[in-house]
Amino acid sequence: MLVSSEIIPALGLFLGLTTATYTLQDDYGTNQTFFSKFDFFTSPDPTHGYVEYVDRATAQSAGLISASSGSVYLGVDTSNVASSPGRQSVRLTSKKAYNHGLVILDLEHMPGSVCGSWPAFWMIGTVPPTAGEIDIIEGISDYTTNEVTLHTNEDGCSIQNSGFSGSLDTSECYIYTKSDGSGGCGIIDPSKQSYGDGFNAAGGGVFATEWTSDGVHVWRFSNSSIPADISSGRPNPSTWGTPVASFAGNCDFDAQFNNLHIVFDITFCGDWAGSEWSSDSCTSKAPTCQDFVQNHPKAFTESYWRVRSLKVYTNDRSTKRSAGTNTIPKVRRRGGHKYGM
Ligand SMILES: *[C@@H]1O[C@H](CO)[C@@H](O)[C@H](O)[C@H]1NC(C)=O
Ligand SMILES: *[C@@H]1O[C@H](CO)[C@@H](O)[C@H](O)[C@H]1NC(C)=O
């Protein structure tokens, strides 16, 4: 009797813990294995940036990528005046596609708040009929705050203005709520530790993205406040409090988001950073965005990702029901990194 009264509560606690906790599905690591889990995108930038995305061998020999002492580096050319098609950079697309899950990115550094740059960490469906896009980290030029944005290829997805601590920018997720295909639902993280120089000054931090049938929820933690359950590899989002961004409401997430790949990139100018050049403070630096990016390699020394870890977790609740059918959009601008591996 004594024995069982001790064992049963312990067993209950154990079972409760395991059902609430995500289990590790993929650890991208911090050595060369990281790069072999991604394809290097080398086509022209679908968002028309002044950039040349190079392959793995070129990136390696030019020092644009490296893996050492517990972190992975992804950067851009900071030595040379650029020539057409633009400044050398990398765009990595995970070979694996996901349906639901918990994506935890621990960064020591993200691209800084540099005029002309347009970095993003995001997820996208690439092959018809898969679809949808989740932009987890994105900004341009000297922006100081992050905006999380979802894009859908079909109408009928709008999010409610509750359940998150950030501020709602737009609630309609369909790309063609704007005629140029740049529509999306967005939530701004008002903290200056959420993006660029401010994030880096705080020692980096963690972006945790939970994707279920009910929606997409993003938490950001600065380096000094990363939850212990993340550090220990037993993440439990239910203990993290209110997410900074939460996309839920009138939307069939399982129909709109399918087979998403994880992407890192840094582009320049193009449809967003280029088109806003004349309207922001960067304009005093050069007459055009391309002029600045082409001729000032040293301006981009802060334009790099340093990844401490990238892990994808799964749990029972994230098992997905059958996917819907979507069509692929033709062109998108802001956040519209578009399809194609
Ligand atoms: C590289 O990292 C992976 C993933 O963490 C690990 O399994 C592998 O053993 C590492 N390889 C080397 C050579 O350290
Ligand atoms: C991040 O936090 C850890 C633990 O608190 C600390 O040891 C480390 O120095 C910090 N990193 C940076 C880059 O500030």
Image (cartoon, grey):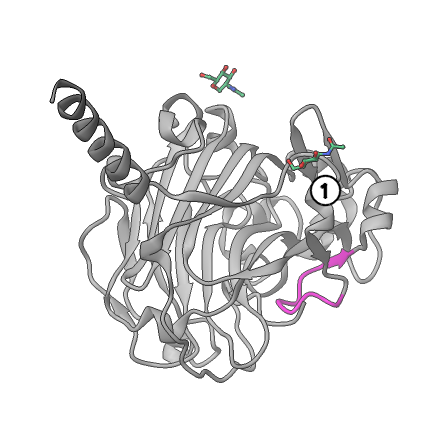
* 183 versus 273 height, above or below: below
* 309 versus 39 height, above or below: above
Q: Is residue 336 left or right of residue 92?
A: left
Please name whichever residue, 16 or 341, is drawn nearer the observer in this view of the structure.
16
Please name whichever residue, 262 or 50, is drawn nearer the observer in this view of the structure.
262
Mark 1: is the Cβ under 8 angstroms from ligand 1? yes
**Quadrant location of residue 213?**
bottom left
The structure residue drawn at horizontal position 22% and vertical position 27%, both measured from the top left corner, is 10
SS type, badge 1: helix
The structure residue drawn at horizontal position 88% and vertical position 41%, both measured from the top left corner, is 61
Q: Is residue 51 magenta?
A: yes
- In the rendered image, residue 230, in percent from the top left (x then y), is placed at 41, 32
**Quadrant location of residue 7?**
top left
Q: Residues in magenta?
A: 43-53
- In the rendered image, residue 336, in percent from the top left (x then y), is placed at 52, 67
Q: Amino acid at mark 1?
A: Thr
* 193 versus 93 height, above or below: above
The structure residue drawn at horizontal position 52% and vertical position 55%, both measured from the top left corner, is 122
- Whether residue 46 is visible to the viewer of this picture, yes or no, is yes
Please name whichever residue, 95 or 74, is drawn nearer the observer in this view of the structure.
95
Dominant secondary structure of the residues highlighted in magenta in the image: loop
Residue for badge 1: 33
- Whether residue 145 is visible to the viewer of this picture, yes or no, is no
Quadrant of the rendering where the N terminus is positioned:
top left
- Ligand 1 is in which quadrant of the figure? top right
Quadrant of the rendering where the C terminus is positioned:
bottom right
